[in-house]
Amino acid sequence: MNVTRSAVFAATLALIVPGSLAMAKGDLSRANPETIVIEMGTAGQRMYFKPNHLDLETGKAYKLVLRNVDKVKHEIEVPAFTEKVFTRKVEVKDHDGKMLAEIKGAIREVEVGPGGEVEWYVVPIQTGKNLEMECALPGHKQAGMHGTITIN
């Protein structure tokens, strides 16, 4: 009787454990996101995003660190991109790294004050090529603050 129970237990364990590992592997809420720092600033008369092009993959978790190294505010506006990603959250922190706010839900644009930093957690869910990203504040796009995002 004990041998039978042991055999049934071992067989059950053999079926459950691999399935549990596969589920954990695909659980994006527990995934360690890839961090991409997007610097926003001014160089002479030009304004910029650095990098000004991103290549992302569907189903992969990302933490976009929006870092404003300038003395004026900047924003990142990406309407087509926001339709193709799931935003997990946006975290706003002070200069010491203490969280001030956590925003959840659909995001259309993110504005970052001078010297500020915001972390935007996303998972791309649809593909798209050359999706526009820009700073829509007056004169910023014209000064060079624009770029593209591709999701494969």
Image: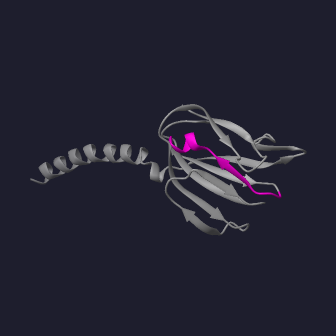
Rendered location of residue 138, percent (x, y): 76, 49
Query: Residue drawn at (14%, 50%), measured in percent from left and top?
Result: 3
Front residue of this view, candidates 37 and 4: 37
Percent across and percent down for residue 150 are 60, 33
Up-down relation of residue 89 to residue 10 (above or below) = below
Please tell me whether residue 149 belongs to the stretch shown in magenta: no
Q: Nearer the viewer, residue 142 or 7?
A: 142
Q: Quadrant of the C terminus?
A: top right
Q: Position of residue 143 (x, y in %)?
A: 81, 42
For residue 137, above or below residue 91: above
Which residue is drawn at the image coordinates 72% and 68% (left, top)? Answer: 96
Q: Residue furthest left?
A: 1
Is 12 positioned to the left or the right of 82 in the image? left
Q: Quadrant of residue 80?
A: top right
In the rendering, at what x and y percent does residue 6 appear? 18, 51
In the image: residue 17, left or right of residue 37: left
Tell me what residue is drawn at x 37 percent, y 43 percent: 22
From this viewpoint, which residue is outermost toward the front? 138
Q: In this picture, is 138 found above or below 52?
A: below
Give the residues drawn in magenta, as a range.
71-84
Asked whether, in this view, residue 4 is left or right of residue 11, the answer is left
Q: Is residue 46 left or right of residue 97?
A: right
Residue 54 visible to the viewer? no
Taking the image as drawn, is residue 108 in sight? yes
- Residue 79 on the magenta span: yes
Q: Nearer the viewer, residue 108 or 91?
A: 108
Residue occupying image coordinates x 75% and y 54%:
68
